[in-house]
Amino acid sequence: MSTKKRRGRTKLADRKPVWELDKLLRRVRELREQLAKRRERLGKLPPNVMVVEELPAEEVHRRIHEVARQLYMQIEETGRPVFEIPARTSDNIIYDEDHDMLLLGQKRIRRVFHSLASVADATRTIRILEIIHELIEEGIHATKREIFYNDVKLFKEQRFSDNVIEDIAAMLGTTRNSTHVVAAAKGAAIGRLVIRDSGDVIDLTKLGSGGWAITPFLDQVEILESDAELVLVVEKDAALIRLAEAKYWNKLPCIIITGKGSADIATRAFLRKLVKELKIPAFALVDSDPYGHYIFSVYLRGSKKLSYESPFLATPEIKLLGVLSKDLDEFKIPKEVRLPMTKADIERTEQLLKEPFVQRNKKWVRDLELMLERKEKAEIQALASHGFKYLTDQYLPVKIETGDWI
Amino acid sequence: MSTKKRRGRTKLADRKPVWELDKLLRRVRELREQLAKRRERLGKLPPNVMVVEELPAEEVHRRIHEVARQLYMQIEETGRPVFEIPARTSDNIIYDEDHDMLLLGQKRIRRVFHSLASVADATRTIRILEIIHELIEEGIHATKREIFYNDVKLFKEQRFSDNVIEDIAAMLGTTRNSTHVVAAAKGAAIGRLVIRDSGDVIDLTKLGSGGWAITPFLDQVEILESDAELVLVVEKDAALIRLAEAKYWNKLPCIIITGKGSADIATRAFLRKLVKELKIPAFALVDSDPYGHYIFSVYLRGSKKLSYESPFLATPEIKLLGVLSKDLDEFKIPKEVRLPMTKADIERTEQLLKEPFVQRNKKWVRDLELMLERKEKAEIQALASHGFKYLTDQYLPVKIETGDWI
């Protein structure tokens, strides 16, 4: 008995996409309403987590002065100045099931100047506060590496200055971006969106096939307008090439972004900004392997390392559109383009299955279990085995039309 | 006796940049004239090399039909069809000293259908000709990986299809880009340049701080206008961030591009297009280590692997502005931010010193020898040890003003 008969329905590979935009978008709009209701129901973050806000430069400046003032008062009053810094250790990281996000608890560490163990860290903390103060006053941004080089004698190794940079952002209750410390960004965006970046108005449908290189200075980016109904997040540049060439946003009103592999902070923050401000759903298109699922999960919930910033980097509304393990059969991906999973792949899949944010999503569990059962993986480009336009003209419309996502 | 006294002149670190644009640009314009004279003197490529041209789609289409017609005639006449393909083996690669480029000789390999050894390759060649024909007719582009996935049964491994793709471009006497087979691009460009890309007019001064993501479809890109006097090619995104933030093109009329590490084909081809069409010099800013020098060399002369395309990917006019080994002392880069060279670094430097294109440039040899003598390297960001704006306000203007490049 064939799989087809057993399932009692046509395989998605054989389904003719309707390509009537209204029908296709009905599913997207349903999801949009569901997400809106969920947002209403959710409301605020729980009270026991660290509240971190994106802040304008003036407010960061004010808070640095406040920290300095308190430090000065402590010196005058007790002679024993101390920094209170939110702990970023794993025992202070909370998985918030309702918000589907990793968050930071209220545990704090004390960094004192009168102990031999912490005096170096305390001095570094003051120095970096001073550097951030300079960045804010000068209205410029710097990378972590530049900050390290700014005072190598004091910082000794970059991991020490990096650590203090994260501490200070957490201490000021703001995102690292708001402290003007940025990371190089490698993502790109294209499609139905008009933004203002450092004063320039940019229409992302009018950038040819190259797209807009996502800037790390997201504090200077403003979303002006968009009639997009969804965001397509693609793992790989190759998929962006395919979609940009087809000017896919003319067919399906969308914004397309890629992190070019594992997404950097700016790309994740930009996706979150789009979804939050435009109130539209986002769909991820990644390789059908544990790494692709992991890349999706980082967009979805943030990464452990940067938990205190999670609410500003995670997009809990994002759905995994594909390529799912079940899609390999559904879309008749030939056996020759499926690759055997390695031992590391299998371990990574088992690891993902242990994560609480995976376990509460039954569809996701089923797909990863199927992957483990088959021990097969495939890249997005494997869809090209049905022709170069299969991705744009069959796979994506059918997946969206049938609401077939996780 | 201090180095300063011995040299009998002020260190560049102490030199106040004039920042009078005309004085600063005098050097750039002198170089521009030198390069123009060199171009006139050079004229055509030598006759014993493979002539490869960028071609419009219609011409590639015509040549594919011509190959098919000849194949058909051979079958009719002799029953023994054969492909004649330019050899891309190292004994057919020529270093052209005058043009400072790697080129392909006229040695050819024959791929016949009636030998067991080559029938699989001949069949693959026909299949890829057919795929390229389809791409051209449909007006779309594809990546090597997608082409591999298009017929995995026949190609077996991607290296086989990749190899045939290069063969066919060489056989048709054109660049791989002209066959609509493209590679993912990671570079970005920003500054005084207006282009047309797939019909859209894009002003690269009006893209905020993010820049334009260089498209792999360079056959669709047209340079419309520019009043830039030079191109700055920076190895790293972090340096682009620094320059984009300062809107450096307003201070110095330039176009800034980055390959974000080792440059991909599209970034190199785009640089070449800029320099060739605008007839302005290009300056590279890379890390002061053998890898940085290697990245510069790939812009300068191409890489061995893609030699037949070298004339379309190499920019022999590019100069190495820095960071030179001698700059570390000249600009008083503190000892703490200089890193010891590893054994691999030293070997790589020795390797570079053996290359003919290095040996004929005395300044380059001296700088690499100094690097070996000191056994020290440093990143571009090490300049931040003098402050975040040191790169833009001291290092770059002084280097250009004093004509201090290789």
Image (spheres, coloured by chain):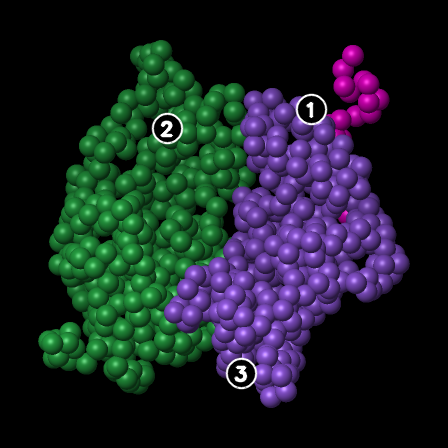
Chain colours: A purple, B green
Indicate which label's residue lies in the foreground, 1 or 2.
Answer: 1
Give the structural element (helix, strand or loop) at label 3.
helix
- Give above or below for A23 relative to B33: above
Q: Position of residue A125 (x, y in %)?
A: 53, 72
Residue A183 visible in the shown view? yes
Look at the image and tell me in which quarter the C terminus of chain A lies: top right
Left or right of residue B133: residue A81:
right
- Please tell me which residue is depicted at 35% across the width and 70% down the height of the picture: B383
Name the amino acid, label 3.
Answer: Glu
Q: Quadrant of residue A266?
A: bottom right
Which circle's residue, 3 or 1, is located before the other in the chain?
3
User: On what subunit does the disc labeled 1 rest?
Assistant: A
| In the image, residue B56 above or below residue A182 | above
Q: Which residue is mark 2?
A: B67
Residues packed near mark 2 inside 10 Å, few (<14), some (14 to 19) or many (20 plus): some
Q: Which residues are magenta?
A: A1-21
* Residue type beneath disc 1: Glu
What mark, if any, has residue A137 been given in the picture? 3
Q: Residue at x 20, y 32 (%)?
A: B91
Q: Position of residue A289 (x, y in %)?
A: 62, 35
Q: Residue A8 magenta-drawn?
A: yes
